[in-house]
Amino acid sequence: MATFSSTTSPALGSGSSPLIISSIPTTNNNIQFSVFIKLPKPNKFPTPKLQFQLYFGGRTSRRTWVSSAAMATGSVQEVRTPALTSSSDPPTIFDGKTRLYISYVCPYAQRVWITRNCKELLEKIELVPIDLQDRPAWYKEKVYPPNKVPALEHKNEVIGESLDLIKYLDSNFEGPSLWPEYDPAKKEYAEELLSHTDTFNKSVYSSFKGDVNEAVSAFDFIETALSKFEDGPFFLGQFSLVDIAYAPFIERFQPFLADVMNYDITAGRPNLKVWIEEINKVEGYKPTRSDPKEIVASIKKRFSMSN
């Protein structure tokens, strides 16, 4: 029979935070299998460590996994269902299920989609894609009167606004933490960066009119922001909601500026280059990405640019 206890273990080094240990004896008294979950210290960004340990009569074999939201655990696999149109029937609204209404091509909706994936909520939050070019009348009438995406149906209410929603998902659902709740400096900086997202986006969009200097200044800000913390390649060191807030837009700006203005946003910006490389490895982000060629074509159409 397995036994459970809460203690500390010198096997993981001095100064370790509390551990929950599960020891499972085997039929061979010389072999013991143990599971250690290293809890985060209050002043650290929450990244619990899961350790499996095998004891072979005096010899220990140990392997550790860090539960990092950056990797969002395993691969996220989800088939994209066709977007609902004006001829589509509505889901059974307010039936107790939690639904996230998005558009596959909307960067604001993508923020919340990424958060859902990284929180490992695929089974708890149903994805409902809407065709914004042919949106159903019932969406405005019965779901979300502002008639925008994203919107979250939860506990018989519907709420919107992407930055509010990514915080809502992180604080109201289980899963890897995406917010530095126990680090005041990172928390303050996170709020500052989130409040800057609109300014950043507007500056880059302004450059599409022909003045690339607006984009230069905007990405210089990003490069500097990425140098604030040295414990990882992301804005707060570790992957967080801040990266999620910026990723969908940088995903769009990079190919467009390269194609139309022959401007490489990573040139002379090593931090941004590494950030893009690492964000593209995040499992919760991968299935939300759009084809770069489709991105460029869409932006050209939006700004009435010829191919």
Image (cartoon, rainbow, N blue to C red):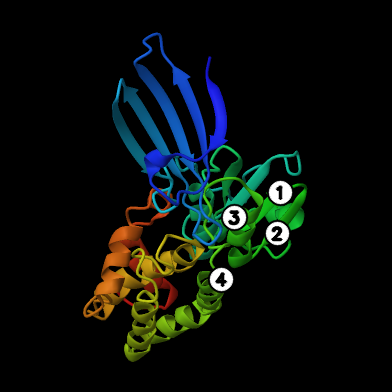
Tell me the distance, in whole angstroms, between the alpha carbons under discs 2 and 4. Answer: 28 Å
Pick whichever of labels 2 and 1 is earlier in the sequence: 1
Number of the label disc, if any, that sits on residue 170: 3
In the rendered image, the vertical position of residue 192 relative to residue 182, given as above or below:
below
Question: Within 10 angstroms of label 3, few (less than 14), some, or many (20 or more) residues?
Answer: some
Residue placed under numbered mark 4 in the picture? 184
- The residue located at (69%, 40%) in the rendering is 97
Q: Nearer the viewer, mark 3 or mark 4?
A: 4
Residue 303 x, y percent position in the rendering: 42, 78
Residue placed under numbered mark 1 in the picture? 154
Number of the label disc, if any, that sits on residue 142: none
Pick whichever of labels 3 and 4 is earlier in the sequence: 3
**Tag 4: amino acid:** Pro
**Tag 2: amino acid:** Ile
Tell me the distance, in whole angstroms, between the alpha carbons under discs 2 and 1. Answer: 8 Å
Residue placed under numbered mark 2 in the picture? 159
In the rendered image, the vertical position of residue 37 relative to residue 269, given as above or below:
above
Pick whichever of labels 2 and 4 is earlier in the sequence: 2
Tell me the distance, in whole angstroms, between the alpha carbons under discs 3 and 2. Answer: 15 Å
Of residue 234 and residue 125, the one placed in the foreground of this image is: 234
Residue 15 x, y percent position in the rendering: 45, 52
